[in-house]
Image: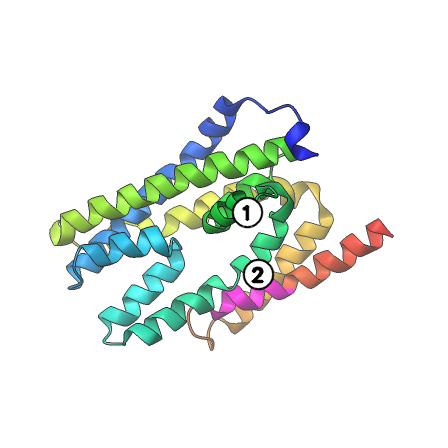
């Protein structure tokens, strides 16, 4: 059904995705520089970005390695953070496409940003185009940024002084605001998730509050079920 719809113009989607790409590249530079400055070889952050491709999970895994933890602990930390993408994948399953190759590649491109950008579009054809345009561009820019940061190594100094950690949250807020304004069910779900995450943050390990926030989906599912009925 989606494949038969007229493809939307790509120029506006590229333009709107550019902000996310820029933020991704900046944070990618930070990740590559932190990893190499901490003592890891250049190939580690580069290969991790190509194969794992998950910003928060990569930062957490590298943090564990630099703190003296082993590969198993680093991988477990990354997997824990990335469990949230299971819910994201369900949200965009009908957007990615039905072919095996499309689903395989699409699953690798599922991130907070691509899902938020795709679901913010008004119709199925535009959602599908937005997912692939933002996803492929984000993947390319992220990996180029990581490579640049890894090659620069410690020359950038303390990347935390640039406030790079605020780039992605700011972009995500901009992406989800339209959905929060238009759909009361989404708004209630987001508020519940945010409240739960804030409540457990002082006591829970890093990454766990994000998983707890997924409980807010229960409110959305209940409201969606009522509307469908």
Task: Inspect the magenta stretch and tell me whether residue 68 lies in it.
Answer: no
Pointer 1 local density, CA inside 10 Å: few below 14, some 14–19, many at least 20: few
Gap in Å between the C-alphas at discs 2 and 1? 35 Å
For this rendering, which residue is in front, 55 or 45?
A: 45
- On the image, the x and y values in percent for residue 168 come to 41, 48
Q: Is residue 22 visible?
A: yes
For the rendered model, the colour scheme is: rainbow
Residue at label 1? 100
Foreground of the two, 168 or 58: 58
- Magenta stretch contains residue 210: yes
In the drawing, does residue 45 fall left or right of residue 109? left
Number of numbered discs overlaid on the protein picture? 2
Residue drawn 43% across the image and 38% down it: 136
Q: Main secondary structure of the magenta part?
A: helix
Give the magenta range: 208-215
Q: Earlier in the sequence, mark 2 or mark 1?
A: 1
Residue 173 in view of the camera: no
Residue at the farthest right position: 229
The residue most toward the front is: 100
Quadrant placement of the N terminus: top right
Q: Which mark is residue 194?
A: 2
Residue that appears at 57% across and 40% down? 118
Quadrant position of residue 196: bottom right
């Amino acid at each position: 059904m989606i494949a038969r719809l007229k493809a939307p113009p790509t120029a506006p989607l590229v333009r709107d995705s550019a902000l996310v790409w820029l933020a991704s590249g900046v944070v990618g530079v930070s990740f590559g520089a932190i990893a190499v400055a901490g003592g890891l070889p250049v190939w580690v952050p580069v290969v991790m970005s190509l194969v794992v491709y998950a910003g928060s999970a990569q930062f957490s895994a590298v943090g564990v390695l630099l703190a003296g933890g082993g590969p198993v602990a680093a991988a477990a930390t990354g997997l824990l953070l990335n469990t949230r993408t299971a819910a994201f994948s369900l949200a965009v399953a009908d957007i990615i496409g039905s072919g095996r190759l499309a689903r395989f590649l699409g699953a690798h491109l599922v991130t907070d940003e691509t899902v938020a950008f795709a679901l913010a579009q008004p119709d199925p054809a535009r959602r599908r185009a937005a997912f692939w345009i933002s996803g492929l561009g984000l993947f390319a820019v992220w990996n180029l940024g990581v490579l640049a940061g890894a090659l620069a190594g410690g020359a950038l100094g303390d990347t935390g002084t640039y406030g790079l950690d605020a780039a992605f949250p700011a972009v995500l807020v901009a992406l989800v605001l339209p959905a929060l304004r238009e759909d009361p069910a989404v708004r209630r779900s987001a508020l519940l998730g945010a409240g739960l995450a804030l409540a457990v943050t002082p006591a829970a390990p890093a990454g766990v509050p994000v998983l707890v926030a997924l409980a807010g989906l229960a409110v959305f599912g209940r409201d969606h079920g009522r509307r469908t009925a």
